[in-house]
Amino acid sequence: MKRFISHEELARDRRFKRARNGNALLQSLPDDVDQIVQIFESIAPKLRQRVAGTSLEAVFDDLGPGFQFLTSSGGKQSKDERSPLQLKIQLHGIFVGELQALEAAGRTLWDFPDAPWDFKMNMARQCWDEGRHVQIFEKLMDHVGVEIGEFPESTFLFETSCHDDPALRVTGVNRCLEGLACDVFRSLIDYGKQIDDSIIEQAVDFVLADELTHVRFGSEWVKEFTRNDPERQARAKAFQRETDRAFSFGGAREVAREERLEAGFSEEELDEIESMGAVGPSRATLLLAAETLRDRHRARTRGENVAPLTER
Ligand SMILES: [Fe+2]
Ligand SMILES: [Fe+2]
C-alpha cells in the first residue's frame, strides 16, 4: 500500500461531491467590498458549476455567487444562532471532517513504520474514536434531515494538516485540526443547550471528550519528536502558526480555552491563536460584499439591468 497519499487520492463513493479547496482564492482577496463583488461576479458561472447537483444549487440561485458568506458556519461560531440550512451545512462539514480525521490518523499510523510503538497505539486508538465520530455525525445528520453528499466536500483540513515529517504531522492533524474541532464542538454543544436539543448537546459532548485526548496525543508527541532538536522544534512551531492562520479565515476565532488548556495548549499559544488576524479580507467586508452580490443577483433575476461595478 502506498505511503504519503495526496488529498486527491482520498477515495469516496458516488454519493460524495468533491469541491476544490477555495481557500487560496479567499485568502488572496483584497479587503475591499467592490473588488470582491467584481471578482465573484466574474467567476459566478464556475462557482455555480461547483455546487451543481447539491443542495447548495438552490441556495446559489437564491443568494448569488457570495452565498457561502451568508450561509457559512465556518470560522467564528455563534452559540445561539444557526439557520436550519447553516446547521445542515455544519453537520455535513463536520461529518466529512471526521472522515478526514480518521483517514489522517490511519495514514499517520501507516506512513511512519519506524515510529515508537506507543505512538502507533495512540494513532490506532484515534482511528477507533474517529470511526465512532463518523457514525455519530451520520446519525446527527439524520436527526436534522441532511444526506451524505447533499453538500460538496472540501478536503481542506486533510490538505493543510498532512505533512511527511511525523512531528509536523501531529502538529497539523492533532494540534491544529483537532484543536479547531474542540472550538467548533464547544460552540455546537452550547447551541444544543440553547435550543433544548439534548441529542445534539450530548452526542457532541461525547465526541469532544475524545478530541481532547487527540489534541493531547499531539501535544505530547510533538514534544517527544522534537526533544533535543531545536531546529525541528522551530519548524513544528512555524508549521503550527501557518496552519492555525489558514484555519483562522475571517479572523477572530472563538477558542475553547478550558478544553484546549486541558489538552496541553499553553495560555500563550491560545492568546496567539485568538489574536491571529484574518488572512485576506475581514468577515465584515465579506459579509457586505455577499449582501451586495445577493442584491445584484436578485435584481438581475427580476430582469433588471444591473451595471458592472466598474461603470458605477
Ligand atoms: Fe473526531
Ligand atoms: Fe479527533
Image (spheres, rainbow, N blue to C red):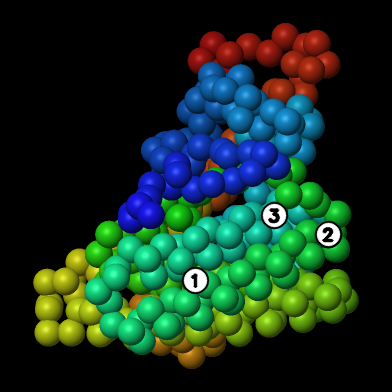
Give the labeled residue for mark 2: 142
Q: Quadrant of the C terminus?
A: top right
Tell me if residue 312 comes above or below residue 223 in the rendering: above
Residue at 52%, 72% in the rendered image:
127
- Judge: label 1 CB < 8 Å from ligand 2: yes
Tell me if residue 223 comes above or below residue 47 in the rendering: below
Q: Regarding mark 1 in the picture, which secondary structure is present there?
A: helix
Q: Of residues 24 and 222, which is closer to you in this image?
A: 222
- Mark 2 and mark 3 lie on one chain; the one further toward the N terminus is 3
Give the labeled residue for mark 1: 178
Question: Residue 157 appears at what percent x and percent y?
Answer: 48, 56
Give the labeled residue for mark 3: 92
Q: Regarding mark 3 in the picture, which secondary structure is present there?
A: helix
Name the side, left or right, on which 28 lies relative to 83. Answer: left
Q: Can residue 155 be seen from the camera position used here?
A: yes
Q: Regarding mark 2 in the picture, which secondary structure is present there?
A: helix
Question: Residue 75 appears at what percent x and percent y?
Answer: 56, 58
Cα separation, mark 3 vs mark 1, equals 17 Å
